[in-house]
Image: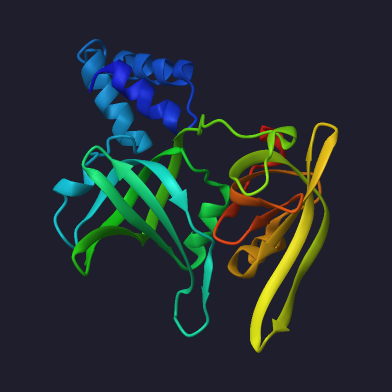
Amino acid sequence: MLLETLIKKAERRGIKEEEIEKKVKEKKERFRGILNNEAAAELVAEELGLDIEIEKIGEMGTNTAGNVEITVEKIFPEKALPNSPAKMMCVMLVRDSSGEYRFVLWGNQANIARYIEKGDKLLVENIRKVKNGDDFEIHSTSKLKISLEKRSEEKTKKIEELREGEIVDIRGTAENIIPMREFEKNGRKGKIASFELVEKNKRIRVVLWNDSAEMSKYIKEKQPIKIEEGIVRNGEIHITKGRVAIRPKSTGK
């Protein structure tokens, strides 16, 4: 493995270039000059678990496990499965160089999607390719590991730019959160929650419906968030088929 390749893989895991170079140098000194840079890099990669093989989803065999690099195109709200052992699922649309696929996260792994944004580039280890009808998709396994390679650079709207009826992505912080409640209208049950999205000195009310309303349980006051595919309606943003992505407070916007 080339040292440059090892450094790139390490950076995906948050390991600094200086630390990798130090480990490679120590490995060469330990073996008293027998190892060149490439051989030492291979040993360091194995020790750090960075010697993984990346596959294209389209070239993986059915019901086989592997590691892939993907770009997230859309994330659907988490869905409760009260009658399933998994209890929860979340579906993402993702793509690699071989095509577009559904990526299904099961059980507690569905929680990971709360911190992923549309446009993020991910390294995903230990997924399984399965056939669903005429299509192929990838599913999480018990050994799933997801690493953020590159944060989304997609542009978002500002509150002052919003227009009635448009579908928008927008960033800000959540304030004045009203917790989720259930309601019944015309014989149909539903869920609703809301909060104010604050962007600099401007505010707008955000209303979450049904599955999207569940997200309100995990949003904290002053939490940096990103709304994806909200609908501007009557001076508010409504989220029905869209969702809310959470960012740790330390990362800001």
Left or right of 70? Residue 239 is right
Q: Residue at x 16, y 51 (%)?
A: 60
Residue 202 percent location from the top left of the image: 83, 36
Which residue is at the front of the view, 244 or 115? 244
Residue 25 percent location from the top left of the image: 36, 13
> Which image quadrant for residue 212?
bottom right
Quarter occupied by the N terminus: top left
> Which image quadrant for residue 143?
bottom left
Which residue is at the front of the view, 50 or 100? 100
Q: Residue at x 38, y 52 (%)?
A: 93
Q: Residue at x 46, y 38 (%)?
A: 119
Q: Is residue 19 above or below residue 57?
A: above
Check the image and tell me how it is coloured.
Answer: rainbow
Residue 247 percent location from the top left of the image: 64, 42
Residue 179 percent location from the top left of the image: 78, 66
Left or right of 151? Residue 94 is left
